[in-house]
Image: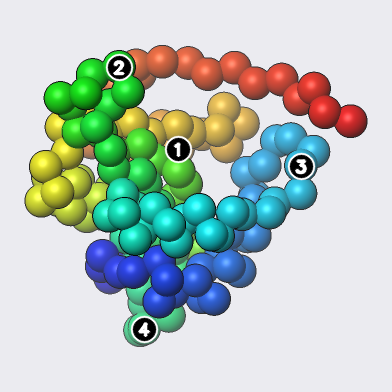
Amino acid sequence: MFHVEKFADNLEELKPLFFLCHDEIASDKAALSPNYAAYLNLETLGSLLLIAAREAGELVGYYLGFVAPGLHYETVMTLTTGSFFLHPKARGKFAGVKLFRAVEAEARRRGVDRIFVGVKSHKDASAVLRRLDYGVTETYYGKWIGD
């Protein structure tokens, strides 16, 4: 069900899921407008990780993260989560746990030392992460200051 795949090969299939995810979790006023060129560039550099969730060949979810040496700790290879999403029809039966186990396996294969995952405070996925022994390391606050 969970596979490492190329972003470039799956972009058209991913786009509807990005918008479903945004509709479900967005808390700000900005319209979703992914910078696909930046994602493609990061993939070319070997810094983008896509784990695709598929059921009977259909893309039903994804994890997107960025692999790079830490900015504060250059010797610590870090995977920073960009976003993750499972279509409601793919949830249950520990699908979120299985997704993150696949992420961790690929991260280890790539030499990652630390994974950071952010969750929305109003659409919290912390139970999945706690089950996998993730701990709270930082709290981010946001404020919309645009028009």
Identity of the amino acid at label 1?
Ala
Mark 1, residue position? 125
Identity of the amino acid at label 4?
Gly
Tell me the mark number nearer the camera, choosing from 3 and 1. 3
Q: Earlier in the sequence, mark 2 or mark 1?
A: 2
Q: Alpha carbon of mark 1 to alpha carbon of mark 4: how far?
A: 25 Å
Residue at the spot x=19%, y=46% of the render?
A: 107
Q: Residues within 10 Å of mark 4 (few under 14, many from 20)?
A: few
Mark 3, residue position? 30
Residue at the spot x=76%, y=42% of the render?
A: 30
Residue at the spot x=15%, y=32% of the render?
A: 113
Identity of the amino acid at label 3?
Ala
Tell me the mark number nearer the camera, choosing from 2 and 4. 2
Dot 2 lies on which element? loop
Mark 4, residue position? 57
Mark 2, residue position? 72
Q: Tell me where residue 4 sits by quadrant.
A: bottom left
Q: Which mark is residue 140?
A: none
Q: Earlier in the sequence, mark 2 or mark 4?
A: 4
Q: Alpha carbon of mark 3 to alpha carbon of mark 2: how far?
A: 30 Å
Residue 37: give x, y in percent of width and height: 53, 59
Image quadrant in which the N terminus is located: bottom left
Compared to 80, does 35 lie above or below? below
